[in-house]
Image (tube, grey):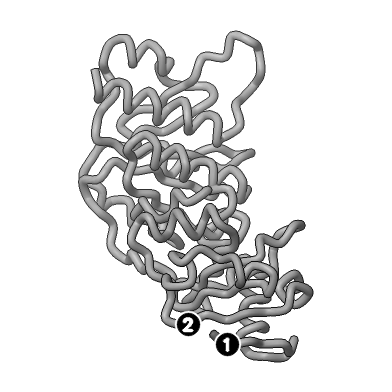
Amino acid sequence: MNVITSRDNPLVKELRRLSQDSTAYRKLGRVWLEGDHLCRAALARGVRPEHAVFAQSQWGIAPREWIEAAPRNTVLPDALFAEVSGLESPARMGFVITVPVAPDILRHTPTVVLDRVQDAGNVGSILRSASAFGFGQVLAIKGAAALWSPKVLRAGMGAHFGLHLVEGLEPSALEALEMPWVATSSHQGPFLHQLLAQQALPMPCAWLMGHEGQGVSSQLADQAALSVRIAQPGGEESLNVAAAAAICLHASATCRVT
């Protein structure tokens, strides 16, 4: 166990960058997981941290599984841990892990494509839905929120560790997918509930989830095998993209089960 008290220590500086800069992980090759839930989710999926970091008040009561999880343990005074934390209420422990590298697209795995979805909360929520409904791969087109950013990690609630994630893609990269693309739309195509009743949803497939304001780009929508609308009898113009994704992915999962 190593104790650090200086704000200028290289590890402290790195933790501060990882917790407060949404794209620092791309330069550093590491991710900061703060808090019990994310750390437990990582361990449950077989992720082994490089480093475990504890606030002083947590070190004495930390479960054995946390202490033994990483080859290195570091303790920071509570005030210093709060400085590097990305949370309003610091969680008092966290892991540093290597960014999982997934350069290759899986051709046959049910997939969610994020076409410039920019809100970190939406992206994290979509990752949770993908994991829950059996879509094992999420592909992010350039312009989407950084998948391993602190805000997306927190919103994802551990879903990251059960998914094959590839980001920074050009639209042309999707040509590697050997399955139909299904584009979400607010104004064209059959209604989702009608397709579900007819058992007419393709599976496996790649669901295209578009930018919060602009939707799926015309470039991708034109290549989709199908465009689908969600009925909204309440009269709203459109659903939040994360809500739409949950509805669509659940429909696919239900269609596959039945």
Say if 73 sits above or below 156 in the image.
below
The answer to the question of whether label 1 and label 2 lie on touching residues, with beta carbons closer than 8 A, is yes
Snapshot quadrant of residue 82? bottom right
Mark 2 = which residue? 72
Which percent across, then down, holds residue 49? 43, 72
Residue named by callout 1? 2
Quarter where residue 7 is shown: bottom right
Res 132 visible: yes
Q: Amino acid at mark 1?
A: Asn
Q: x%, y% of residue 22?
A: 62, 65
Which numbered dot is residue 241? Answer: none
Quarter occupied by the C terminus: top left
Looking at the rendered structure, the secondary structure element under dot 2 is loop
Residue 37 rendering spot, x and y as whole percentages: 53, 52
**Which residue is at 58% across, 43% downward?**
122
Mark 2 is surrounded, within 10 Å at the Cα level, by few (under 14), some (14 to 19) or many (20 or more) other residues, namely some
